[in-house]
Image (cartoon, coloured by chain):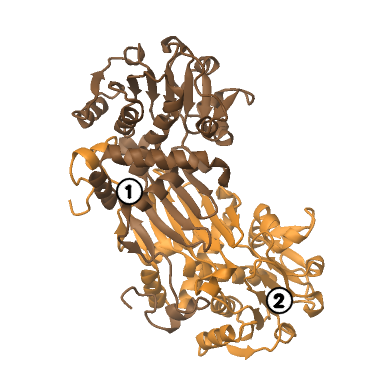
Chain colours: A brown, B orange
Amino acid sequence: MTRYIGSGEMADILRREGPEPILRRLTASLRADFLRWTDFDLSPRLASHSAGGVIELMPVSDAELYAFKFVNGHPGNTRLGRQTVVAFGVLADMATGYPLLISEMTVLTALRTAATSALAASVLARPESRSMALIGTGAQAEFQALAFKLALGVTEIRLFDVDPAAVAKARANLEGRGLRLVCANSVAEAVAGADIVTTATADKTRATILTPDLVEPGQHLNAIGGDCPGKTELHADILRRARTFVEYEPQSRIEGEIQQMPPDYPVTELWQVLRGDAPGRTGRDEITLFDSVGFALEDFSALRCLREVAGAGPDLDLLPEPKDAKDLFGPVFSKEGAFDRAA
Amino acid sequence: MTRYIGSGEMADILRREGPEPILRRLTASLRADFLRWTDFDLSPRLASHSAGGVIELMPVSDAELYAFKFVNGHPGNTRLGRQTVVAFGVLADMATGYPLLISEMTVLTALRTAATSALAASVLARPESRSMALIGTGAQAEFQALAFKLALGVTEIRLFDVDPAAVAKARANLEGRGLRLVCANSVAEAVAGADIVTTATADKTRATILTPDLVEPGQHLNAIGGDCPGKTELHADILRRARTFVEYEPQSRIEGEIQQMPPDYPVTELWQVLRGDAPGRTGRDEITLFDSVGFALEDFSALRCLREVAGAGPDLDLLPEPKDAKDLFGPVFSKEGAFDRAA
């Protein structure tokens, strides 16, 4: 049987644990897996593009576990009352190939993305960072705000979105969670004097959410919205001024902000900084950029963590379990009802 | 909501329809999709190999639908009382990226593999073919036998397996289905005088189930067991004598029997023959070989067909459905219970 965690149970689990404890556990899981980066069989995700968006499969494995996530990105979905990004994931046993867990990952992806952003910022932002501009206050926003509060001690969030309803939503959700919330009237107002700038917008275009004149020395930029070919958020001149960190270079060259740059544009992979193999921030005035696109290893860590947190629960008859492993035909067509769960 | 078909419901559906009608519908679905081959976004499957086996993701899409299958191949599983190959699949809507259906595919894969084999044989085997040797009588065997009966009018099946219990199992399952069943004492005995030879063995090795001295002029070889790097069933000299047909050349070069041959070894893709763009069998004495590895398009066809056959039924809360598509945080952490199915 395959353990199943739907969006109903996921909400129950997360509510029971609370957002900050779960972010703390996810961050620990992510850090542990980034530190053993070389144990994994890594590959860029497999993307199917269409006019309206993209569907991706993101597999990764170590010697014990295999994980993959199904995730889409369809910016036009919100016009239909649907979400831009939905996801589910699977953990499987490498020894037998059998799936162990299938879980919703729409909410879990938002949590792991935020935990990864904050993990990166913990080695890239100035240690005294207290304020963050949050440009784009859609589905990811509150998760980012709480992860940065938790990991860096951020106390002030400046919210900006072209959709005022989205700002009001984020504000209402973040109210009473120990953060000073400022609604900015423009990107410029949100960014001016902020220690950290997070961009989390959704258009599938070459957008320039941030222009070079807005960026200040010493800022850390956490760019999570540009994550597929043709979808970027930063002006290329910002990349020319910043030191840039990525998750997995082969994938980021295709999908990240750095798709705008020549192939020899220098980047550092985050795991190298976490392991102490490469420097993070090297000076107070340096502009650091975490060009995040979301990598399969993060989903592996999130599913591994979820499996521990969730414990036993409902499962699915996703696989037939014939008494004779070589007899698939008989239980269906000769021996009535042998696959039935009640049997 | 995502429609769910577990192995229990799958068995119900297949029993209700009957094996031959379902094979007929699958064959029609496969033929229709092979004929519009160029409408699809194709790629070789993404494989994660380990010492014990392989886990693969097989995606494919056209303008409307996206499909992928998760499938393993672990030859040692039968020693643990588990199946060598288990699978599940997903259909999703290209316009929104939302998953529409998640289904068991262990049984469905056996059916679609058999339907594909028979579809290929219908243009490659001699029209008067009536007898088939079936080497390897594991989980795939009965499906192959019935598909060949249906598509080609095969009346005699000669069964051989190194495991006598597997032969007895296949014989018992096929009894009373309008086939003359012969249990052979060796591969040679099964193959001698047979019009068609199907090899469906499971070892992850360079095996030589069939040697050149056994193969007779005019035979059609349906090799379905060799399907990943390092796993083959035929002696290379058989490939040198045969005209070889594959599903999707880039994948078959890596996974098929033809992995034994140089890159310029000539092959023809099945869809070209079905469309009349390339010849199938060109003479009575020609040895034809369908070097089948299983391709994502076949799963697409099978899932599309299944969705029609199954109709409405149970579904999963695999995706959260927040009232405000930009508010993922609120329903979990601020607005109690908003994702709960009972709410």
Observer able to see residue B4? yes
Horizontal side, residue A89 vs residue A251: left or right: left
Q: Is residue B42 left or right of residue B233?
A: left
Q: What is the crowding at mark 2: few (fewer than 14 residues within 10 Å), some, or many (at least 20)? A: many
At 27% from the left and 37% from the top, the residue drawn is B329
Kind of residue indicated by mark 2: Arg
Residue B255: x and y in percent read 67, 59
Q: Give the residue number, with chain letter if any, for mark 2.
A: B126
Tag 1 residue: B319
Q: Distance between the residues labelled 2 and 1?
A: 50 Å
Q: Which residue lies furthest to the top in this view?
A: A213
Residue B57, image x, y percentages:
53, 54
**For residue A296, side relative to residue A150 (left or right):** right
Under tag 2, what secondary structure?
Answer: loop
What is the chain letter for disc 1?
A: B
Helix or strand or loop: what does disc 1 sit on? loop
Please identify, in this view, whether the residue under mark 2 or under mark 1 is nearer the observer.
1
Percent x, y of residue B290: 68, 67
The disc, 2 or 1, on the residue closer to the chain's N-terminal end is 2
From the viewer's perspective, is residue B239 above or below residue A141? below
Q: In which quarter of the image is residue A253?
A: top right
Name the chain under label 2. Answer: B
Residue A143 occupies quadrant = top left
Name the amino acid type tagged 1. Leu
For the residue carrying disc 1, how many other residues have a C-alpha within 10 Å: few (<14), some (14-19), or many (20+)? many
From the top left corner, tell me how far across and down residue B227 is, in percent: 64, 63
Q: Closer to the camera, B157 or A42?
A: A42
Q: Residue at x 63, y 89 (%)?
A: B183
